[in-house]
Structures are given as C-alpha cells and as structure tokens.
Image (tube, rainbow, N blue to C red):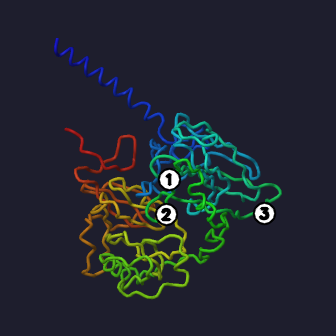
Amino acid sequence: MLQKISHLNISKALVLLSLITVPAITTAHMAMNEPCPRYGNNGPNCPSPPSGQSYDYNIKAPIGTKEGIDQPLCKFSVPYEEPVAVWNAGESVKVSFMPNSAAHGGGHCQFSISYDGGSTFAVIHNVLKHCFCNGPNGGNTASVLSYDIPLPAHLPSGRAIFAWSWVNALGNREFYMNCADVQIKAHPDHSSSTQYTGPEMLVANYGADYPVIEEFNGNYDTGIEFYQQQKNITVGPSASNNSAGAGYSAKQPEAVAPEKQSQNIREAQQSLAQPFLPATQVAYSAPLQQSIPPPADAAAAPYSTPLAVAEVEPQVTHLAPAYSAISASKLSYHALPSSAPRRVYYANRHPKMRKLLSPVKHLRIATSSPRIQNSVSTERVDDGSSSSSSTNTKSTSSEKSPCANHGDMRCSKEGTGYDVCVFGKWVSMPCAAGTECSVGDNDTSPRCNWPKQK
C-alpha cells in the first residue's frame, strides 16, 4: 500500500513538474522561421542539415551576452548545398518568426546581407525600438511574427547569407542572430550591379569587445546611437575586403612566410604569458614590453581589439587587457589592427568550444570567465625550441599528419578530447573533466559526453 502511494505521489510530482516547465520551453526567446535558418527543423521547406551537421535544437537561444560569447555570428559556418530561397532584388520578401516565442518587450532588429560567407554584413532593413511588437510593450508576448522586407534594387546576383539580428528590450543583455542561405537575382534595371553599400550590421551585447545596450526600462531610444553611428560598408561577390568608409583598410592581409611562423609563435608564447598593456598603449608582438607612442587614429578606435590568431604579418595595434595565454598551433599569432573588421570566432565557455573550426579567420579566447581557464589547448609546433606555452593551459597530444578538410572533427586516440582540422593541421581540444569523446549512432560529429554506464 505504501509503495502504491509512493508511486502515485511520484507520478503527481512529475505531472506538476511538466506543467511548470512546459510554458518556459514553449515561450523561449525568438527565432527566424522563414526563410529557413541554418539547420532549422521547424520552418517550411527546411532541408536536412549538411553532412556531418545536426539540427539546431537551441535555435532560439542567444549567441552571446554582454558577459561573453556562446557561438560565432551565424552560429554555423557550413551552408546548405542549395539555397533555401531565391529572391529578386527590388522586391519584398516575407520573413517570419516562430510562434510561442518570448519577445522580451521588443527591441532592435536588423536584416542584413553578406556575400563573403558571413564575414561582413550590410544592413538592408531596420525594425528598431519595437521589433515583434505594435508599439511599446512591457510584456513577453510577440504580437508581430512576420515582416515584409524590401530588398534593395541594387543587390547583385549571387549566393548570399541573409541574417536577422536582435537586441532585446527587456531581460538579460543578449544578442540573437539567425542566418539563411539564399540566392539573389539582380534587378533587370541593375543587372550589371556587383556591389551593395549599406550600414554595417551592429553587433552588441556580445562579449567584452562590443558595445553594451542596456535594458530599455521604458526608454525605447536606448542604444539607438550605436545604430546611427554605424559606417557604410560595401558587400558583393566582387567587393574587395567588403569595406567602404572610414575605419576599414582596403588591403587584404598577406600570409606569413613559413620560415617566419615558428619565430612568431615563440614570440607570442613569451609575450602571452605576461600582463597586457593598457588599451591606450600599443606594442609590437615581440617584445611586448617595448611600448611605443599610439598611432594617430588611436583615440578614434571604436572598440579595443584583443590578441588574435591569424595568418598575417604582426602589426602595431591596441591590445585589450582581458586575454591570457594559450598554447600555440601551427598558425602565427599577431594582434589585429583596431581598424580591422570585427569578424571573429571564439573558443569560449568550455566544454562547448564550438565553432573554433569554421572558418578560422581569427580566433579570440576571452578569459574574463573563470569557466574557460585551463580549458584551451592546441597542438605544439615542433620547431626545435625549448620554449613552452603558459602552464595555465593543458596540452593534449594529436597526430601531426595533415588533414584534408578544414573544419573536420574527430575524437582523439585517447578519447579524452577531440581534434579539429584547422587549415590543414589537426588541433587538439580536451574534453571537460569526467567526460570523454564519442560519436553518436546517428551523428558523425564527435561530442564530449559522460561515460555510458556499463
């Protein structure tokens, strides 16, 4: 009898728990529904994810907050093989959002276009202040779930990425973004158009190097100045560096000669282990202690620029203070100039560590959060040097054989981590303590999971 009562009580508790949790699940955040965002599984005409990829079951989640970065812009770098929509420049297109979503009081939305795989986005339409709402709304229910977005007539033909981005009015200071793979057909009157110029998409509430738009608290002009200050950029299949206006350099970075890579890595390892200079000073990558007067445009730099990983020559630059040492991979380290486009990929919030792989133009590792200390490791370069990386990181071994496809992943031989193919070389990442790398039955992507009970 007691056992029967116990079972009944447990059943009632489970039912009560489900009633409590279901509303929270069904009203979580916002996400684009049409055109189908990458790896979406709810929108009309959503294809299966590309080979090796999984559906995005957290599609409504923000990609970052003012405290840090959860995922890179667009979240996923591997596009669908075919566009999910074909649009004609000069026409209006319908963009809809998932029902039963939380509008967080509205906020600022932008709709943008990229022709370079998502490195740069130019805005084609704004819905500021009251996105998802008909005027000021202190509640959480979205009253507007679709918009007719006018496509500029000068958009050039080609494969493109259409992006929706959002800064919410109420709640945690977050940044949302979904991206869709589309095909643009040029307007008949502008068939020779090869470029489109528009404001650069604003990225805010996305870690330490981006502006913070505070909670609106009834003032829907909050953060508008950031949108008004965005410079124009040029995008398109033929847009060199996709830049226009002040603050961008038209020169593409040159690759570091192979014989200089080992030297740059040693210098970076030594300098990374030391405290950074204030952001108002500049330094060469070696030695870091040798400061020099700031460049003429130092005061005009819009945001501080952290140390980054890229295959380019070291340059004089501003350094942000909140970054610590990482071990070196077969990439050269340098600090990006403050005028460089702020398109970056983060290995952040371990054990997620996702999207380091795709495409790794620049890698920033923010260490303002204690959760990612001692969590980043990369393959050491066997260059004959006895110098080692900071003891704050844990290196794991990996094969030094070349890899074919940038972005490929595999579990390490020991099963304690996983390897990522970065520009032809395997880079090792550890799993969190107590977890091990494994591949699911229906998924080719390695994951760090708790060991299965035997």
Q: Residues within 10 Å of mark 2 (few under 14, many from 20)?
A: some
Ranked by sequence position, the earlier of labels 2 and 1 is: 1
Ranked by sequence position, the earlier of labels 3 and 2 is: 3
Asked whether, in this view, residue 359 is left or right of residue 322, the answer is: right
Q: Which residue is mark 3?
A: 192
Q: Position of residue 3 (x, y in %)?
A: 17, 16
Q: Residue furthest top?
A: 1
Q: Residues within 10 Å of mark 1 (few under 14, many from 20)?
A: many
Quarter of the figure with the N terminus: top left
Cα separation, mark 3 vs mark 2, equals 36 Å
Q: Position of residue 297 (x, y in %)?
A: 55, 81
Q: Amino acid at mark 1?
A: Phe
Say if 127 sits above or below 376 in the image. above
- What residue do we see at 33% from left, 70% from top? 324
Q: Nearer the viewer, mark 1 or mark 3?
A: 1
Question: Does the residue at mark 2 contact the one at mark 1 (Cβ under 8 Å)?
Answer: yes
Q: Position of residue 312 (x, y in %)?
A: 48, 77
Q: Residues within 10 Å of mark 3 (few under 14, many from 20)?
A: few
Q: Position of residue 180 (x, y in %)?
A: 58, 49
- For residue 175, which numbered disc appears in the image? 1
Asked whether, in this view, residue 63 is left or right of residue 83, the answer is: left
Q: Amino acid at mark 3?
A: Ser
Residue 117 vs residue 82, the one in the foreground: 117
Q: Amino acid at mark 2?
A: Tyr
Cα separation, mark 2 vs mark 1, equals 11 Å
- What residue do we see at 72% from left, 49% from top? 150
Ranked by sequence position, the earlier of labels 1 and 3 is: 1
User: Where on the picture, by quarter, is residue 2?
Assistant: top left
Residue 244 vs residue 402, the one in the foreground: 244
Report the label total: 3
> Mark 3 falls on what kind of element?
loop
- For residue 210, which numbered disc appears in the image? 2
